[in-house]
Amino acid sequence: MSERGLIATVILTVILGLILWPDSLQEKVKKRCETYLEKHGRPSQNDCEKIWASFTQAFVGKDPCGVPPDAYDSLIHPVSQKPACNKMLFWSKTKEIVHEFAKNCSYVTLEDTQLGFLLDGLTWCGKKESQEIFTTGCPSWSDCVNNPVRSFWIQASAAFAASACGDVSVMLNGSMDMSYDPDRTFASVEVKHFNSSIMNSLTVWLVTKEGDTKTCDSDESLKTLQTDLGSYLKYQCKVVSQSQLQTCIAD
Ligand code: N1C
């Protein structure tokens, strides 16, 4: 075989290998864990092996519809980190734009914390009386309440919200009828865990697209948000268009 032919064969084999045998969940999480620690330093309790062990004990060997949020307590509590007061950013149905914004404007979302970073976008579940870990065929968000992925985000969101301090922001989707949807995690978990002894105010950024006529006053669901916040947390709301945000991100 010519040298060129050999190089082409090697490249083809590597590509095929990557397609047929993608990283296992453990490899993916381990790589992300190393990347995170390289960027943020290495506090000893945030050891990647230990994190993997407490993560898997939450769902391995269990029915994929039988993992309640508190199964993740021994993972979440030791890893919880110092909150970035006045820079914490929540979201609901605005994930993409929020993460662009957070990255460029030094806001901190749950996915910027170690556990959020490790598990964002991944799927996992176990099986009763088995040591296997599955990444396909797992129950979806609406299939059953106590599914491993949903329970993780509920518990991680609750802990993140409980640590929210100072002036806090949330980006809600102004293109939806109810930007504050009682069924989403922001309303059903996070607002309920805000702690008015460490948090001062919540600013809603109502993100609109061109042509949207939504204002802070015309969105009835925001009245519910104000009621849910109670009288100790200050509330304000501003409409911001996606293009304004994009300009801000570019700047
Ligand atoms: O249900 P949501 O939004 O209101 O949840 C978003 C809210 C944010 O403020 C986050 O702090 O809750 C937290 N959160 C995540 O950080 C997160 N990352 C990835 C909640 N869910 C998260 N996911 C996945 O997005 C999760 O699998 C779930 O299905 C969606 C929820 O997004 P949403 O409905 O837009």
Image (cartoon, grey):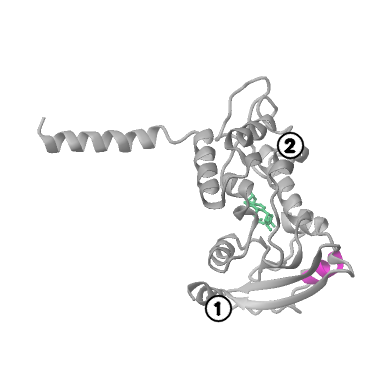
* Residue farthest to the top, as pictured: 129
Q: Residues within 10 Å of mark 2 (few under 14, many from 20)?
A: some
* Residue farthest to the left, as pictured: 2
Horizontal and vertical percent for residue 122? 56, 43
Q: Is 15 on the left-hand or right-hand side of 207?
A: left
Q: Is residue 142 visible?
A: no
The answer to whether 205 is drawn above or below residue 5 in the figure is below
Magenta range is 222-228
Compare residues 126 and 84 and report the one nearer the observer: 84
The residue that disc 2 covers is 74
Question: Toward which corner of the image does residue 107 lie, by quadrant?
Answer: bottom right
The residue that disc 1 covers is 244
- So how many labels did they put on this image? 2
Horizontal and vertical percent for residue 9? 21, 34
Horizontal and vertical percent for residue 27? 49, 35
Q: Which residue: 63% across, 37% down?
A: 51
**Looking at the picture, which amino acid does disc 1 mark?**
Gln
